[in-house]
Amino acid sequence: IAVDGPYDDIRDVEGYRERMVENRAMGMTGIWALTPGQVVTANEAPLPPKTGSWLLELDDDEIELDAEDGRQVYDGDELSLEQVGDDSYVLRVDGEEQELDGEELHEELLDLTTYVPSMDDIVDSMEEFEAAKEAGKGAIAMTQATTLVIDGVEVDIAKDRMWDEATYQAAMTPVALFQDVYEHRPDQHDALEEMYGEGIVERAMAVGTDD
């Protein structure tokens, strides 16, 4: 089922008809009816978060790490880490134990973590790619880095992600929804500006445009 947005008050009859015509042209034939009180929540739910977060993926669980002083702290019992030498660590995940050196630990933790970008992160990356594209570059590397703290042991991790046109277009999807909501729902302007800040809203409205 394809779910469309932004959602409109059903009282906006002409806007509703126009949206349905556009939806049918894209093969979306389902009809969703919301009460006016549901519209704001439905429009904001799929938008990028205000702040980014790091997740630890263990089995089928996604655990959000606690951000403290620029570090990401894990406070749980499904994973433990002990430093047993200058460059030797014991990592335990769900009862399974591995003895790793620093490089191996770095790679293992990279596999267990993922980053959920904020609106600011997405806009930053899109602006950087747009600038690189204007300079004639078809792809650029962007680095995500943080410090993990597990059982008091600090480990710096960093991963590079290649951005090309396909990556840019994928990132544009939630931003395009934001632009659509902001353009068609002036009653939500104050809430969106309070959530993200006026500066980020202005930048988010500018990326992906020809102006």
Image (cartoon, helix red, strand yellow):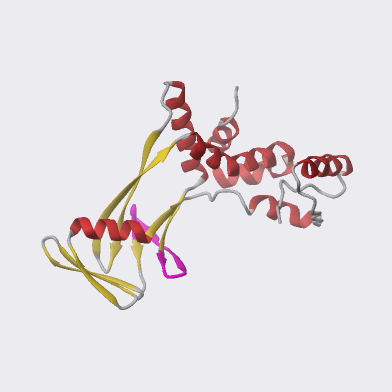
Q: Is residue 120 visible?
A: yes
Is the magenta region chiefly helix, strand or loop? strand
**Residue 83 horizontal/vertical position (percent):** 17, 67
Which residue sits at x=68%, y=39%?
A: 180
The quarter of the rendered structure image containing the C terminus is top right
**Which residue, as the protein is rendered here, is positioned at the far bottom?**
95
Location of residue 148 (image quadrant): bottom left
Which range of residues does the magenta coloring cover? 57-72
- State the residue in front, 137 or 197: 137
Q: Is residue 162 above or below residue 76?
A: above
Which residue sits at x=55%, y=37%?
A: 169
**Which residue, as the protein is rendered here, is positioned at the far left?**
86
Q: Is residue 197 visible?
A: no
Which residue sits at x=82%, y=49%?
A: 9
Q: Is residue 195 left or right of residue 125?
A: right
**Residue 150 horizontal/vertical position (percent):** 29, 66
Q: Tell me if residue 11 is in the magenta stretch.
A: no
The quarter of the rendered structure image containing the N terminus is bottom right
Q: Is residue 123 left or right of residue 110?
A: right
**Residue 38 horizontal/vertical position (percent):** 75, 57
Q: Is residue 75 above or below residue 103?
A: below
Location of residue 76 (image quadrant): bottom left
Q: Tell me if residue 71 is in the magenta stretch.
A: yes
**Residue 149 horizontal/vertical position (percent):** 29, 62
Count numbered badges in the picture.
0
